[in-house]
Image (cartoon, rainbow, N blue to C red):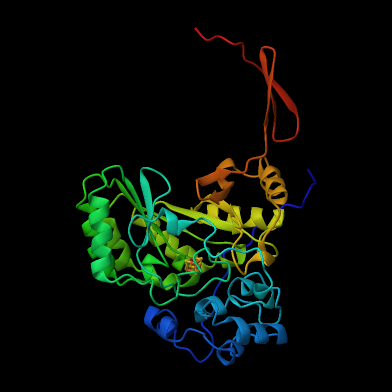
Amino acid sequence: MKNWTSPNRPPLRPVQVPEGIAAEDWESVVWQMQNRITTLEGLARWIEPSAAEARAIEDLARRFRFVITPYYASLMDAKDPECPIRRQVVPSALEGDDPSGLADPLDELAHSPVKNVIRVYPDRIAFCVNNECALYCRFCLRKRMVGETGWSMQKSELETALAWIAGTPEIRDVLLTGGDPLVFSDSRLEWLLERLRAIPHVEIVRLGTRLPVTLPYRITDSLCRMLERYHPIWVNTHFNHPGEITEPAAAACERLLRAGIPVGNQSVLMRGINDDPVVMQSLCEGLVRIRVRPYYCYQAQLLEGTGHFRVPIERGIEIFRGLRGRTSGFAIPQYVLDTPHGKVPLDHPYLHGREGDEMVMEAWDGAVWREPNPIDLT
Ligand code: SF4
């Protein structure tokens, strides 16, 4: 294990309201959604697009939607095309150069008993209730459907999925995802939650949302008061880089937490974004400081147009092995690969195996520990 310098512990990143925009507009979800960046000209108001980015927008924005909220754009380094915030949302020419990538690497379509319900495990489902997001991430696992017409769910289709859940008593855990379920209005989301809560075997509802990161002003007090009525609700959000942990993002998570909603984080390990132990430690510790639990870090999938983000699994194992002992255990997410058969933990092999009456294992600092462990099957 190589040593690395522990990260600085910066204060929360402030977000300044850009000059010429009224604070009430900036913090308005309607204003943010109406002023989203969808063109090169629009992007050029925030950053200096490189020639390569300009070409990629021209060539690739139609293959996967190019949309960025002004809030998220304000976090980008205007001059550096390698900025880890910028690379998550601005098209790259490398997207067109990925012959091995698949459209649906988790074979979700084959695991779908009704439209937009994905069932890999017996007791839980992912319910893709919409196909809209505030912005579109270039690495999105569901790029085959998010932002595309034909995937959005009509109310009658939501009813069909709800009827399937009601008729499948093994389902106790429903993850609302998409797209992003918090793009729904409060009233539409409440309608859905009411219907799910009326199904006795649905014990918990989870929301998978990136809005605390990409449009934190959506997490309003009134939304949280509504969610509170449908507990147990859990939220998993998606920070990938410490530069996304801003004052508004922290305030959004705080509002959810005050409503009694546990907030976890699922990130994706990506080259040039967070495949650096210092950056990963800084991300995980920054999340813990705002009381968001690092839950999973995903190995990037063999997904079309994302080969430039993929990191060898050995590198991921090395990063998370290195975090062990260097930071609090609950600050270390489980590093996993999602597969059509569910998640596979990609743990460093700490347990070396049995030697006589001892189990031999490796401690965080590399020391070998032998734990007496006589076989007694009585
Ligand atoms: S917010 Fe989530 S679902 Fe939406 S584009 Fe990004 S990764 Fe995909």
Q: Residue 105's image quarter? A: bottom right
Camera-nearest residue between 332 and 268: 268
Camera-nearest residue between 377 and 106: 106
* Rendered view: 365 above or below 117: above
Rendered location of residue 149, percent (x, y): 40, 77
Camera-nearest residue between 361 and 13: 361
Q: Residue at x 25, y 57 (%)?
A: 162
Residue 8 visible (yes or no): no
Q: Residue at x 49, y 65 (%)?
A: 142
- With 92 as the anchor, is 297 left or right in this view? left
Farthest-out residue, top = 378
* Rendered view: 277 above or below 63: above
Farthest-out residue, right = 2
Residue 34 visible (yes or no): yes
* Rendered view: 226 above or below 67: above
Q: Residue 222's image quarter? A: bottom left
Farthest-out residue, front = 110
Rendered location of residue 294, percent (x, y): 53, 51
- With 136 as the anchor, is 173 left or right in this view? left
